[in-house]
Amino acid sequence: MFMKQKHHHCSRLRLFFPPRLIMSVLFVIFSAQILRSGDDETTQARTIVREIRVENVGSGLVDESFVLVHVGTKVGDSFDGRRVSRDIRNLMDTEIFSYADVRAEPLSDGVRVIYSVEKKQKLAQPVVIKGMKHFSEKRIRNWLDLNQGDLVDDQVMGVKTLKVIREYRKDHYSLAAIDCEIKTIDREEGLCSVTLSVNEGRKAKLKDVLFEGADEGRIGTLRKLVKRYPVWDIRRLFQKRRYSDTDLALARTEIRDYYRNRGFLDVTVSQPEKEIGEDGRLLITFS
């Protein structure tokens, strides 16, 4: 049975953290109200957990017994704010839920504890990927590492898409962005679809390679080592260097060996810094 569709957008990384601190404060206030008056026997009775409920605030079915197994609070226990805070942490650590919270309601002879949870949704079909040109769909799927039936939410997809964006950054696509849409397609079963829209932006062209701390007389030689010719050199017109991290690591080693072979045994060459200027061009600096 297909229910009303629900849309989530996760173009930015969103992290869900239950308001544990707020809940702890509320529990302290709640406990203080319970303990405000009355004899010890009456006060103790007011703090007894008489009932525990599980409330599903999301899609799909929630196994109440699964929740109760992962919480330390039991019927008959004295109410403990710190314990229920640990319960929330335990539920989130299962990685089944996108959200978990707890509240307490006073009863005539104790308290009712209610755990509110929202399950992550299951992928009903492979992720749809649109807009990519530089990388193949297969490579992006490998980086995402998501299969039909996997649990997803905004946080999961935020982490997954960030991994893909980092791969674009490595290839100098500094403006690459990915918009993620999570669409609930069966609320009762907790099934969803995910669509990624990739906006690669323009690849940053190399503006120059700088060598901080190097003698002016050696700059020409260092440029040859990284195969970056000066502006006036015609060979620059045929240069198609990508300057990947591997290229730069090899260039760093060649620069270091160049100096050591000439007696500079203590020379150090730092990791090259890559910077995208306001003109969108790449500047690489060795020092």
Image: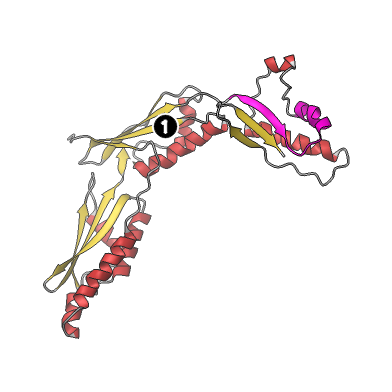
Q: Quarter of the image holding residue 185? A: top left
Q: Nearer the viewer, residue 149 or 261?
A: 261
Q: Residue at x 17, y 84 (%)?
A: 41
Location of mark 1 (residue): 178
Residue 145 seen anywhere in this rendered image of the structure: no
Tell me, what colour scheme is on the image?
Answer: secondary structure
Residue neighbourhood size for the residue with mark 1, other residues' Cα within 10 Å, grouped as few (<14), some (14–19), many (≥20): many
Placement of 119 over or under 48, stated as above or below: above
Left or right of 202? Residue 106 is: left
Q: What is the residue that sits farthest to the front in this orientation?
A: 278
Number of callouts: 1
Identify the secondary structure beneath mark 1. strand
Magenta stretch contains residue 206: yes
Q: Nearer the viewer, residue 124 or 46?
A: 46
| Quarter of the C terminus within the rendering | top right
Q: What is the residue that sits farthest to the left in this orientation?
A: 108
**Residue 215 position in % (x across, y down):** 81, 35
**Residue 66 position in % (x across, y down):** 27, 57
Q: Amino acid at mark 1?
A: Ile
Left or right of 172? Residue 4 is: left
| Quarter of the N terminus within the rendering | top left
- The residues colored magenta run 205-225
Magenta stretch contains residue 102: no
Residue 272 seen anywhere in this rendered image of the structure: yes
Left or right of 141? Residue 88 is: left
**Residue 238 position in % (x across, y down):** 68, 15
